[in-house]
Image (spheres, helix red, strand yellow):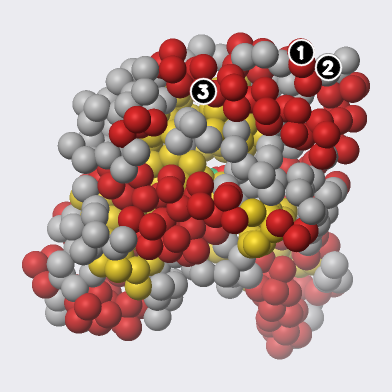
Amino acid sequence: MTFYNERIETMSRDEMSALQSERLRALVKRVYENVPHYREKMKAAGLLPEDIKTVEDLPYLPYTYKQDLRDTYPFGMFAVPMEKIVRIHASSGTTGKQTVVGYTANDINMWAECIARELTSIGAHRGDIIQIAYGYGLFTGGLGLHYGGEKLGASVIPISGGNTKRQIQTMIDFGSTVLACTPSYSLFIAEEMKEMGYGPGDNKLKYGVFGAEPWSQQMRSDIEAKLGIKAVDIYGLSEVMGPGVSCECCEQDGMHIAEDNFIAEAIDPATGKVLPHGEEGELVFTTLTKEGLPLIRYRTRDISVLNDKKCACGRTTMRMNRVLGRSDDMLIIRGVNVFPSQIESVLLEFGGAAPHYQIIVNRVDNLDLLEVQIEMTPDMFSDEVRRIEDVEKKISHELDSVLGINAKVRMVEPKSIARSEGKAKHVIDNRII
Ligand code: DLL
């Protein structure tokens, strides 16, 4: 078994806990001194930095929410002056406001090391050719994997997402051995390859590093068979860092958390109570080493289970099971975060549309398709077909510009969308993953 950083990856639980406590003390002092938001929150909770001595004291600290980042948009929670920020990423937001994250040079280096460790843990090394088909840009997927691949010393192909035929030709001609993209895109690539007349034996791929959206064991088996690879799950979120907060090793039995940099807790999302390891709950992360945007007890809304048992690979770091879902209603469509409220606000801007709508997500040929059905007002129902089509096009165009993904819009008859007696069910997610 090869490790990238054996000392950290195989530390005893006691040593890890001591390292985390030491880093937590420094973190709390740092945010108290440099981030007004945290200073005020701690003051309101009657806490001084010296009250936090070990990881056991973590539950005394208040939670941080996505809303806190929005309220301090864009850079209000950065803990260093802008002269120290060398990279900015952002993730899509619900109200037009994106969540902005900043990294110092040390942060980028730490991120790259996390990815380099993870790539090593699946069996990749120098000489491997990594095709990165995650999007490059404000999304953290592309550049996150990129720097890690380079740090490992592998040959990185920064092809980004899309242009599937060229993607496949490149993969075959260059002899790519690792594919990094969303799991749904990997299946789309596999299917397109088949159509182009290639079988699993025609590519040199060995591993797939797939994440950014939920997927299942069945999907894994399907991808592995179709591409002839070992597929691992990689998790992360831009606020906390990006991809690589955790990743599966060659054992494919839960994702190892980079615990020297991130403390994970699972909590009951309703009560905020910390749950024992092994129980399903909302993941909460504290970033121990991040300088640009350190976060204390960040509520991810992702539901998973933590496992602190030693893995057969020899690593002692805590693992998390695949993400089971989210405690809020965010949809991930083709890797893009979509909130029903974003769609709702677009629809409500248009006359002729009743406030009854349904968001339907289907997976056809491994691609997520978003359809929005909107009830017409009775007035509009008696209108010309051309005018109705015109409104459909306008809404679709507006959704595209707000969400960044294409949506099919269909105006339907008045009263044809089911009413609910309790909360309205606006989202029908037909994807079986
Ligand atoms: O999706 C970072 C990433 C890029 C992870 C590439 C893995 C690979 P965001 O756009 O901020 O960041 O979205 C974060 O995506 O809270 C989860 O709900 C979901 N997510 C990420 N990885 C997984 C995964 C990137 N492996 C949100 N399984 C997170 C399930 C995932 N959901």
Q: Residue 296 sits in which quadrant?
A: top right
Q: Which residue is mark 3?
A: 19
Which of these two is toward me, 173 or 4? 4
Can you give x and y, in whole percent of width and height, for residue 207 in the image?
A: 23, 55
Q: Is residue 25 above or below residue 173?
A: above
Q: Is residue 356 left or right of residue 409?
A: right
Kind of residue sitting beneath label 2: Leu
Mark 3 burial class by Cα count in 10 Å: few <14, some 14-19, many 20+: some
Quarter of the figure with the N terminus: top left
Q: Which residue is mark 2?
A: 47
Can you give x and y, in whole percent of width and height, for residue 325 in the image?
A: 51, 37
Instruction: Find the residue positioned furthest to the left.
Output: 201
Q: Are marks 1 and 2 in contact (CB under 8 Å)?
A: yes
Q: Earlier in the sequence, mark 3 or mark 2?
A: 3
Report whether the residue tagged 3 is closer than 8 Å to ligand 1: no
Determine the residue positioned at 31% across, 50% down: 119
Kind of residue sitting beneath label 3: Leu
Q: Is residue 165 left or right of residue 377?
A: left
Q: Secondary structure at mark 1?
A: helix
Q: Secondary structure at mark 2?
A: loop
Determine the residue positioned at 83% across, 70% down: 350
Which of these two is toward me, 414 or 387? 387
Can you give x and y, in whole percent of width and height, for residue 15 in the image?
A: 44, 17
Marks 3/1: CA distance? 18 Å
Q: Which residue is mark 1?
A: 51
Residue 383 seen: yes
Determine the residue positioned at 51% across, 23% down: 19
Kind of residue sitting beneath label 1: Asp
